Amino acid sequence: MAGHSDSSSSEKKSNEAMNDVPVFSAENMQNNMKVIYYSRTFMSIIGGVIAGILGFTGFMGFVFYFLVMTITSIGLIARAKFSVHSYVDSWNRIILDGFMGGLMSFVLFWTFAYDIVHIF
Amino acid sequence: MAEDLVLDTAIRDWVLIPLSVVMVLIGILRYFVSKLMRSFQTPDPKIVKEGHFLFCRQVIVRARNLRAAANFITPKSFRSRRVYFSNEENGLLFVPKGQAQNLQAQMFSDPNMAMDMMKKNLSMIIPQTLTFAWVNFFFSGFVAAKIPFPLTQRFRSMLQNGIDLSTVDVSYVSSRSWYFLNLFGLRGLFSLILGEENATDDTQRMMQMSGFGFDPSKSLSAEKDGLDIVQHEWALPKFEHRAEAVLKKLVS
């Protein structure tokens, strides 16, 4: 998890105000979204390599991808110390953001590792 | 067909890995080239239309900021700012219809801007085309990889282009499909190793391209409408009370 916490060590609070209207610092929000995106991409690449080495095929591989994404989401939420609203503006962002983008990288590295290991 | 074909190790060494390496290197090269080209473009102060264009851009940014932060200024000052922008006669956002058409026509016929768009488009398309032609020339006619998930028969013609046996499982693909897989999958890798968002993201650049030409008239009127719609809600009425509470907490 050291690599994981490294990449999200620069999450900043984007909602500091305590009044009724939530205030968002746009720059910090953008930085947080970038961190989330990088974390997801990195995890999907690693997940792809693992899935290839373990020899998952077909449906199992996609199930594994969703598993990896869920683990990433849980990690990010834990990193935000469970007060998600002070870092991003809605739950959907931290959970669903880079899902589809990571899929292509996952498939690429999954194919690569699978081929190298199993059809050598 | 459930048997596994065993493919030659040489394919791994001489097809898959070099293709991926070449695509990564080309992506990095393209990133640096686009950075260099951008630093060569100095802003041209002598083009009056460009000046007008930049002025419109700044007005739009100001109007957008006003809309976003509308609730933090008093109602009266917000209203006065809004009138300044959307006043019928001399408001900044109001563009009479005749002038709007003119601006757009001028924008498109401006040679500088057309050249810019062409350059950016070409710098995307040419490496892709060249690499695709190279892949087709050298790496066709054999099975290159096996994709780990099954696909239907309809994908066969797309993925197995050089392979002429029709009984081979659709999972065994030619190198052309390895090229496409790399094309889409390396985008994530590029964003990790090259820092910020770079030129390999096609969809974003397409959107930027289409937003370029329409900038003056349509976005001005869109901003004006948005500004007119805003309902001002004074969000800081109890400001002094809140300050008092916070100070009390600090002191006690």
Image: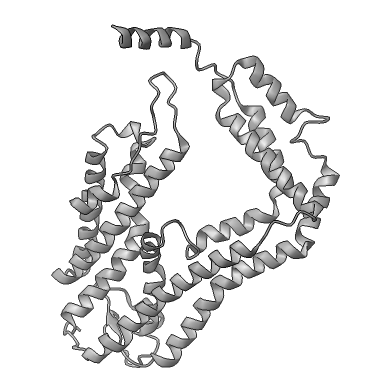
Residue B11 spot, x, y in % from top left: 27, 89
Tell me the quarter of the picture where residue A79 sits: top left
Q: Is residue A117 left or right of residue A37?
A: left
Tally of marks: 0
Vertical position of residue B244 compared to residue A76: above or below: above
Residue B168 visible in the current orientation: no
Residue B74, x across and y down, in percent? 60, 16
Q: Position of residue A84 (x, y in %)?
A: 30, 34
Q: Nearer the viewer, residue B31 or A94?
A: B31
Q: Quadrant of the C terminus of chain B?
A: top left
Return the x and y of residue A82 as percentages of the image width and height.
24, 34
Q: Is residue B135 above or below residue A78?
A: below
**Could you tell me which residue is drawn at 76 percent across and 56 percent down?**
B107
Left or right of B160 in this view: A54: left
Q: Residue furthest right?
A: B98
Residue B195 appears anywhere in the view? yes
Residue A95 sits above or below residue B163 on the image:
above
Give the residue at x 33% y 78%. B153
Q: Is residue A1 left or right of residue B234?
A: left
Q: Is residue A111 above or below residue A27?
A: below
Q: Tell me if B202 is positioned left or right of A54 in this view.
A: right
Q: What colour scheme was applied to this rendering of the protein?
A: one colour
Which corner quadrant holds the N terminus of chain B?
bottom left
The residue shown at (22%, 55%) is: A68
